Image (cartoon, rainbow, N blue to C red):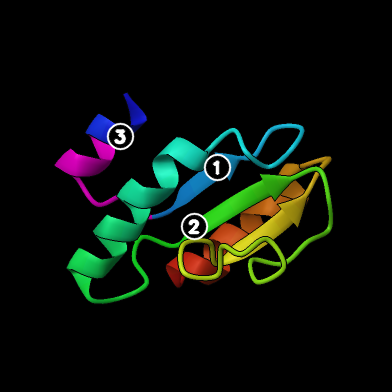
Amino acid sequence: MAVKTLRSLIPGAVVLDGGPDNKDCDTLMSSIDTLRRATGKALPPVILLSTKNDTPESLGLAHVVDVVVAKPITPERLQPVIDRLTGR
């Protein structure tokens, strides 16, 4: 469903839950990469929710993920990141 949705619209931001090993979203990464290349920009901005305090670079995802936010997630931690990436 998520891949189909990505093909039909460009969301304002994508928030992915990497799961316990940061691999739960691997099937979406190529679709997001294709979408970002098609826009010619780093759009949509992508946030990965992670069990570790990693960076996109350390995970080898710098071309697809803009920010990694470590769990546990709270609105007070996540909302400022979304606002910054979407220019609010």
Q: How many marks?
A: 3
Q: Is residue 60 above or below residue 7?
A: below
Q: According to the image, label 2 marks what residue?
A: 46
Spatial CA distance of label 3 from label 2 is 14 Å
Amino acid found under the numbered disc labelled 1: Leu
Q: Secondary structure at mark 1?
A: strand
Q: Label 2: few (<14), some or many (≥20) within 10 Å?
A: many
Q: Secondary structure at mark 3?
A: helix
Q: According to the image, label 3 marks what residue?
A: 3
Magenta extent:
5-12
Name the N-terminal-most of marks 2 and 1. 1
Q: Which mark is residue 56?
A: none
Tell me what residue is drawn at x 36 percent, y 50 percent: 30
Tell me what residue is drawn at x 73 percent, y 46 percent: 50
Spatial CA distance of label 1 from label 3 is 12 Å
Comparing labels 3 and 2, the label whose residue is closer to the camera: 3
Residue 45 placement, left or right of 72:
left
Q: Secondary structure at mark 2?
A: strand
Q: According to the image, label 1 marks what residue?
A: 16
Residue 24 coordinates in the image, percent (x, y): 59, 33
